[in-house]
Image (cartoon, rainbow, N blue to C red):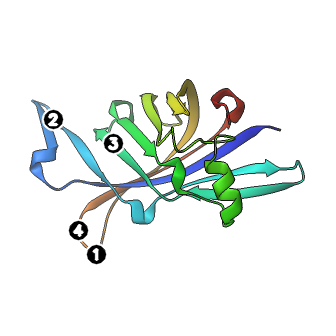
Amino acid sequence: MRAKKLISHLTVSRITSTRNVIIVIKREGVIIMTKFNFDQVHSDIQFKIKHLMVSQVKGTFKQFDVQLDGDINDLTSLKATATIIPSSIDTQNEDRDNHLRSNDFFGTEDNDKMTFVTKEINENQVVGDLTIKGETHEETFDVEFNGVSKNPMNGQQVTGFIVSGTINREKYGI
């Protein structure tokens, strides 16, 4: 199997600054289009891949950002862009990490970021363009919306998502 499984767990916090909140007023209700703060401390991007067909290697990308805008009450209104820094790969093995940064895999000297830009989001899936090593392909990932809550530490509204799926790494030259 040459597919690489990417599992990303994302948590975003709603921005409280009004300069980043767009309020669309419709009588019979107010729609709040919000730009969310990304909470990297409580988020991660993980992956696992078969190694030599007999074991699995797990890893993370330590540097990433997600921009998310829209009305959390209408998931179809959400627009997101995830940016991952491939040189931040960490598999708990420095030699392997350096090999993964090489042109055999991510080619991080020439490819300083990977991106996923959403095209469509619904209650169960997200469809978007994934770009790795200059190759862009449409991918569909499963989405689990974890709901909305109030952070008891600072009173801010928080929301969370788990996005998971499998990609064929060969399409991206990896």
Q: Picture coordinates of residue 150 (x, y %)?
A: 30, 64
On screen, residue 117 versus residue 13, left or right, reads right
Q: Quick one: label 3, few (<14), some, or many (20+) residues within 10 Å?
A: many
Judging by the rendered image, the residue that carries numbered circle 1 is 153
Which label was assigned to residue 68? 3
Whole-number angstrom distance, CA of label 4 to CA of label 1: 6 Å
Q: Is residue 9 visible?
A: yes
Report if the CB atoms under discs 4 and 1 are less than 8 Å apart.
yes
Q: What residue is rendered at 53% in x and 48% in y?
A: 86
Q: Amino acid at mark 1?
A: Met
Q: Amino acid at mark 2?
A: Gly
Judging by the rendered image, the residue that carries numbered circle 4 is 155
Q: Amino acid at mark 4?
A: Gly
Judging by the rendered image, the residue that carries numbered circle 2 is 29
On screen, residue 67 versus residue 83, left or right, reads left
Q: What residue is rendered at 66% in x and 50% in y?
A: 100
- Of all residues shown, which one is farthest toward the bottom? 153
Report if the CB atoms under discs 3 and 4 are less than 8 Å apart.
no
Which label was assigned to residue 96? none
Whole-number angstrom distance, CA of label 1 to CA of label 3: 23 Å
Whole-number angstrom distance, CA of label 3 to CA of label 4: 20 Å
Q: Nearer the viewer, residue 169 or 13?
A: 169
Q: What residue is rendered at 52% in x and 56% in y?
A: 88
Q: Nearer the viewer, residue 142 or 29?
A: 142
